[in-house]
Amino acid sequence: MKRTFRNLRSRLRPGVCAAAALVAAAPAAARDMHFDPLTAYGKDIVFDVYRAGERIGEHRVTFDRTGDALTAESRFSIRITILGLPLYRYEYSSVGIWRDGQLARLNARVDDDGTVSTVDAERNAGKLKVRSDDVHSVAPDNVYPTTHWNPGVIGTAQVLNTITGRINSVRMQEVGTENVVTGGTHRLARRFVYTGELETEVWYDMVGRWVKMRFNGKDGTPIEYVCRRCGENTVHNSEGAQTTAPGTL
């Protein structure tokens, strides 16, 4: 049983917070340092998390603004059971404070089946200093954390891993557009494949909103985020104007 726990842990970690880099012709929203999630998404984003087609948990990001500070709080929780018996649990939470399009502070916590770790980052004198259990470093200017909701990450080559506290080198390739399920309907989204020190696939819709994620565990088991709520679904009519698709959230 303990060996099973260890195997599940190693399978789930690689894709939980992987994120991104280097892409040509990025969406306009992705190039905007002041992307406003409250305008793009509303008060929150919600994904159902599936492993091999079975729902195992939820990932939710909530947004709030006080004065010039934007707060983005991420919570990810999964439970894996066999025959109704608890086998494995993983909980992740982070709170990021953004000012003027830059990450000003971040506090993250992971409970990996009872093993707890933390990452803390704070901007001081223009430098984002990062501390974790085994890392003390200064992050590159304008680095993005691996929380996915901000499409500004597209076009960067390094990201702050909010699980380990390390600065990861990454590369991303756009591989086309697809219709993905969002809130019981579909919308067109661009699929990006992330490689390098982190590997996953992430989909952003045509205005830059995060709408899907997928990665494989080491044994090839697929883990997929399916959007339950990720902003209104906008489509283009025959005259090119944006409209809200009927029946969307």
Image (cartoon, rainbow, N blue to C red):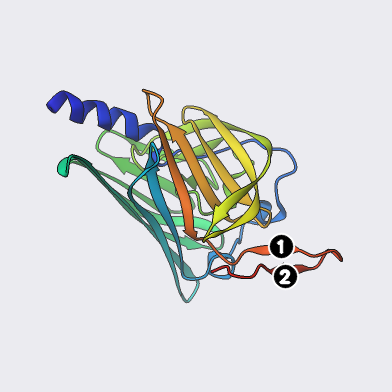
Q: Which mark is residue 235?
A: 1
| Cα distance between the residues tagged 2 and 1 | 5 Å
> Who's the residue at 34% across and 40% down the image?
163
Asked if residue 95 is positioned above or below residue 65 in the image, the reply reads above
Q: Judge whether residue 123 can be spotted in this image.
A: no
Q: Is residue 202 left or right of residue 50?
A: right
Q: Which mark is residue 124?
A: none
> Who's the residue at 62% across and 41% down the image?
191
Number of residues whose C-alpha sits closer than 10 Å to that of mark 2, classed few (under 14), some (14–19) or many (20 or more): few
Q: Position of residue 136 (x, y in %)?
A: 33, 37
Q: Position of residue 186 (x, y in %)?
A: 61, 56
Asked if residue 91 is positioned above or below residue 42 in the image, the reply reads above
> Who's the residue at 44% across and 57% down the image?
104
Contact between labelled residues 1 and 2, with CB atoms less than 8 Å apart = yes
Q: Is residue 164 left or right of residue 113?
A: right
Q: Position of residue 18 (x, y in %)?
A: 45, 38
Q: Position of residue 21 (x, y in %)?
A: 59, 37
Residue 90: quarter of image: top left
Q: Residue furthest right?
A: 239
Q: Earlier in the sequence, mark 2 or mark 1?
A: 1
The one nearer the camera, 127 or 139, is 139
SS class, disc 1: strand
Q: Judge whether residue 115 can be spotted in this image.
A: yes
The one nearer the camera, 93 or 225, is 225
Q: Which residue is mark 2?
A: 243
SS class, disc 2: strand
Residue 165: quarter of image: top left
Asked if residue 65 is positioned above or below residue 177 in the image, the reply reads below
Q: Amino acid at mark 2?
A: Thr
Q: Amino acid at mark 1?
A: Val
Quadrant (top left, top right, bottom left, bottom right) of the N terminus: top left
Asked if residue 144 is positioned above or below residue 158 in the image, the reply reads below
